[in-house]
Amino acid sequence: MTLLGAFARRFAVFLGTALVASVVIFVIVQALPGDVAQATLGLGATPDAVEALRQKWGLDRPLLVRYGEWLLGMLHGDFGASYLTGQSVSGQIAPRLAITGWLVALSIPLSTLVAVPLGLVAAMMRRRGLGAIVNGASHIGLAIPVFFAGAVLVIVFSVILGWLPANSYASLMTKGFSDWARHMVLPVASLVIVQSCLLVRYVRAGFIDVLTEDYYRTARSVGWTKWAGLVRHGLRNMATSLVTVLGMQTASLLVGAILVERVFVLPGLGSLLIDSVLNRDLMTVQGVGMLLVFAVLAINFVVDLLYFAIDPRLRRQVRA
Amino acid sequence: MSVLDVKDLSVDFGHHRNLVLDKVSLAVDDGQRLGLVGASGSGKTVLASAIMGLLPDNAHISGEILFRGTNLASLGDREFSKIRGRKLSMVFQEPMTALDPTMKVGLQAAELISLHRDSNPMATRDRVEQVFDRVGLSDAGKVTNAYPHELSGGQRQRVIIAMALMNRPALVICDEPTTALDATVQTQVLDVLDSELAASGAACLFISHDLNLVARMCNEVAVIHAGRIVERGTTEDVLNSPRHPYTRGLLATARIDQVEPGERLPVIEDFYTPDDRDNAGRHTELPRRWVSQYGPRQWRRSR
């Protein structure tokens, strides 16, 4: 089979999984106990009024029809309208996705940039002081909850020093770059601190593996110094496990960023999901849930492609 | 003049300082092929790694390793790296894992040139293909563009030999270069190694436990046992009239064709005479770690 065929197959799996997920999400959400119309009107409402609302929202129609409408709508970006507010779900998601998207898009590459050199040092100097310090610091950093890191950063940089705003979001479009950047520094920094501590551990373990490999010894024997040889012949070999972790972290951060969004009063995707679950805003829950599933599947798809780019042995297996 | 002169080299490992090499002295002359024979765990590979400066971090080393008058044991990583791959190179035992799986072999071989001298990409590629061609990699241009997993074990070992010879080194250390290959490929690879070493005039320290290979490749042989060089002489002398009981045992145990079916296979200890035992009745030549395992604590060497 060709490489293109392998991509096509993975893409088909990606789409198929997304379709199955949409069914699961729809069934779970629509089968939740508690009638939305009843809940909205309160316990004192007459059955007639409840029935009228059900008809108005289309809840009396068969499940299959409602699923079909939802699915077709999503294909051109319409996630339906909220039962509670009547607002478009897509319209609710978009601004929040922008905030969470920036947090993820900035913190993942930045924490990688921090973690790779630190992990390299921790691996190479693992029997010496500096390596132990980096390793110990990453252990401690792992134990710090991201909201705590955020709170400490706010106390230091906003309250005491007054350099940066403590909370809220400034849109890049309307407020301009410098205002946006000033508001992003602390939330992104607190994510980077915690994320990079986790990454350092994987990078360190990956490089330590390389140090014991025969090809590293060969690299040394042809004249690479310890450090240069490890970077030259270790980075790419270590990268497979790194992108696996990065993929998982990106996926978990889409919702997990709520921990830092709450501290900095940023209306992100996670808080939209939680608020709409609490309010029984089913269309929004369905929409956000579907978006997250789609994002996770897309991330996995990209990670799969990266494996092929990194490791030539996988390309061979595909052809064989 | 000797290209390599190891003097009183001792190596021990780790917290307990387990002694692996015990005051080893060994000289290799210019252009000479010296075989180094010994059983598993006798310290062959540690000696090779020590000469290459590739011992793990927890190794302690004492003594001198003079390479063309420079004491390698006292060199820092940066200075040593300028010698490794250029004047001193190594062929490893395991061709399947000795190459970086994510990099084309031509690129890995080209590093030998780009690391040690200024060379434009065209000249580098020509040189790589020329050496690949010499070690019998047919269609060298295609091989340079292959990843290691796309080559057979024999091809990979040829690549590694080509890399070791790339900069016309003064000394090539071969650590069981054909052990991992099957018999027919083994012969071909040895032929290539033999002729290319002869053509380049490089000296060679040929490490093996296979006496036939050593007899074929080397004019002199040293026998290492329990971290000590116990015997050295011309290949003919050592193989025909071994003086040390360990060597006698090594030679005799290699002749399993003389063992009758059903008979017990000889082991090296069978060839020790009572004279070889110390007062306590122990073999004086037992490896240190056996001694520390079975003997009283004061047997463990401490420094």
Image (tube, coloured by chain):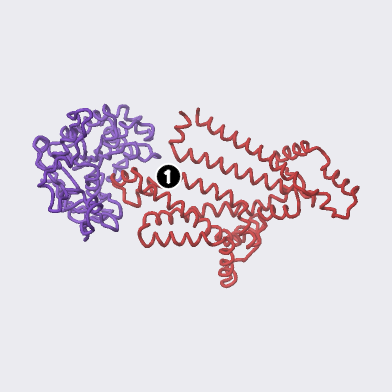
> What's the amino acid at mark 1?
Arg
* Whether residue A64 is situated above or below residue A132 in the rendered picture: above
**Marked residue chain, label 1:** A
In the drawing, does residue B33 fall left or right of residue B78? left
What residue is drawn where x is 67% and y is 44%?
A290
- Where is residue B272, by image quadrant? top left
- Where is residue A13, by image quadrant? top right
A43, A268: nearer the viewer: A43
Across and down, in percent, residue B120 comes to 31, 40
Across and down, in percent, residue A16 comes to 63, 35
Across and down, in percent, residue B15 comes to 29, 58
In the drawing, does residue A240 fall left or right of residue A181? left
In the drawing, does residue A16 fall left or right of residue A197? right
Tell me the SS state at disc 1. helix
Name of the residue lying farthest toward the bottom: A160
* Whether residue B170 is situated above or below residue A191 in the rendered picture: above
B225, A255: nearer the viewer: B225
In the picture, which chain is red?
Answer: A
In the drawing, does residue B71 fall left or right of residue A119? left
Dot 1 alpha-carbon crowd within 10 angstroms: few under 14, some 14 to 19, many 20 or more: some
A243, B94: nearer the viewer: B94
Is residue B203 at all visible to an observer of this figure? Answer: no
How many discs appear?
1
Q: According to the image, label 1 marks what residue? A: A236
**Which tint is chain B?**
purple
Is residue B146 at all visible to an observer of this figure? Answer: yes
Across and down, in percent, residue A275 comes to 72, 55
Question: Could you tell me which quadrant the C terminus of chain B lies in?
Answer: bottom left
